[in-house]
Amino acid sequence: MELYLVRHGQSVGNTMPDRDMPDSPLTERGLVQAGHAAMYLRDRGITAIFASPLIRAMQSAQPLAQMLHLPVQVRKELYEVREGDLYMGPSLESLLDYVPEATFQDTIEKDGWVYPGGDYHELVVQRAREVLRQLRMCGEERIAVFCHGNFNEYLIREALGIASSAHIRFPQANTGMNHIIFREYATELIKLNDTTHLEAGQLSYQQSSV
């Protein structure tokens, strides 16, 4: 399986790092970044698109979904690392107003999904391990996953077999691309935080809110 792991575009929360904004939408720059990411991915043979239920990730996946006429398959477990308090996300009806291309698992709460908070290293490592296991078993040959800066780092470390090495960091630009191929007996890291799809002046590295 080939995985294109993409951080979301610049969000309103990224521009206000001192505020707790767990679920903010994309900025104008973020929407442009998402469009360029879609252009980069559209001819890569993507057969499925997955996204976190956080609005910024769903919006980032939307342009590619529209180009490829594929749904955005929302997976709750892709949410960003959050050390703070529990947050109740929007209803599924509200999320569909943002991204009509979205489809949801039955496990996502209809009237407002629960973003649990209280994350710590060992718990996120376990979640990243389970996410990769599920993705590798999804039956698709080549997938795009739109996720988050901090959780992407956990997924990359898990893929590379260094899950416990939190001191090894992989900074993620907004819409930075990570290309990983999972073979039967090997894992190949093809690209890490690739931003060549972005034009001059579009690059942004603001960290996600937790």
Image (spheres, grey):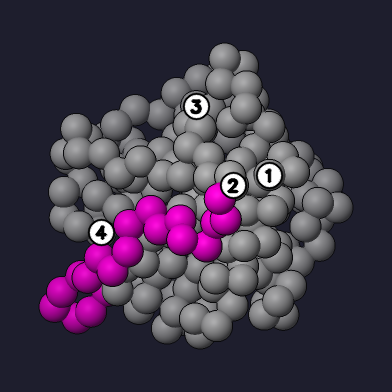
Q: CA distance from mark 3 to mark 1?
A: 21 Å
**From the image, which quarter does the N terminus lie in?**
bottom left
Q: CA distance from mark 1 to mark 2?
A: 7 Å
Q: Which mark is residue 159?
A: 4
* First-in-chain label (2 vs 4): 4
Residue contact between numbered discs 4 and 1, judged by CB atoms under 8 Å: no
Which residues, given as a range, are shown in magenta? Answer: 182-200
Report which residue position mark 2 lands on: 202
Q: Secondary structure at mark 3?
A: loop
Picture coordinates of residue 54, whole percent (x, y): 63, 44
Picture coordinates of residue 27, whole percent (x, y): 72, 40
Seen in the picture, residue 75 relative to 9 is either above or below; the reply is below
Q: Which mark is residue 79?
A: none
Report the front residue among 153 and 52. 153
Say which residue appears at 53% left-offset and 45% top-offset.
203
Report which residue position mark 3 lands on: 210
Q: CA distance from mark 4 to mark 1?
A: 30 Å
Q: Secondary structure at mark 1?
A: helix
Say which residue appears at 34% left-offset and 28% top-offset.
120
Left or right of 60? Residue 41 is left
* First-in-chain label (1 vs 2): 1
Q: Secondary structure at mark 4?
A: helix
Residue 153 seen in the figure: yes
Report which residue position mark 1 lands on: 29
